[in-house]
Image (cartoon, rainbow, N blue to C red):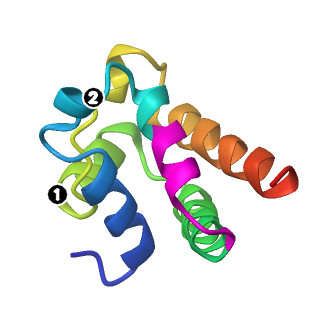
Amino acid sequence: MSREFPELHDFFGAYFHQDWTVEHDTAEQVIDAFLADSDPEDLLAVQHELNVLLSQRKEEFVLRDYLLKELSCYYCYWHAWKSGDLWLRHIADRLAIRLDHP
């Protein structure tokens, strides 16, 4: 469990777990499910931790390793996104839109 980002660990571990493809066809569906299941306080907490993580500007391969080993994220974003930074910013944007339009 990530002591630095407990909310992100819970998000990735619960939604992008090893078997996420059994429950959803796409990563976007996973994000949709999280947005639908979560209350605004949880969304804000994940958004805050996500913004802190992004501000650390980790190198690409360091970020991949961190997401897997520290945050339990089993989505291989590099198959669909140019970088982890872009994918995480996409999630942050989705959170912002949901919080602005409840």
Side (left or right) of 75 relative to 90: left
**Which residue of the protein is positioned furthest toward the top in this rendering?**
80
Q: Position of residue 35 (x, y in %)?
A: 57, 50
Side (left or right) of 97 relative to 14: right
Number of labels in the image equals 2
**Gap in Å between the C-alphas at discs 1 and 2?**
13 Å
Element type at mark 1? helix
Q: Residue at the location (33% across, 15% down)?
A: 79
Q: Main secondary structure of the magenta part?
A: helix
Please state which of residues 36 and 73 is positioned toward the viewer in this rendering.
Answer: 36
Q: Residue at the location (25% across, 58% down)?
A: 13
Crowding at label 2, few (<14), some or many (≥20) Cα neighbours within 10 Å? Answer: some
Q: Residue at the location (56% across, 61% down)?
A: 50
**Which residue of the protein is positioned furthest toward the right in this rendering?**
100
Can you tell which mark lies on residue 76? 2
Q: Position of residue 65 (x, y in %)?
A: 22, 48
Please state which of residues 26 and 1 is positioned toward the viewer in this rendering.
Answer: 26
Q: Is 83 part of what is drawn in magenta?
A: no
Report the span colored magenta.
31-40
Please state which of residues 40 and 58 is positioned toward the viewer in this rendering.
Answer: 40
Q: Can the viewer see residue 79?
A: yes
Can you tell which mark lies on residue 79? none
Considering only order in the chain, which callout, 2 or 1, is on the residue closer to the N terminus? 1
Crowding at label 1, few (<14), some or many (≥20) Cα neighbours within 10 Å? Answer: few
Can you tell which mark lies on residue 69? 1
Side (left or right) of 98 relative to 101: left
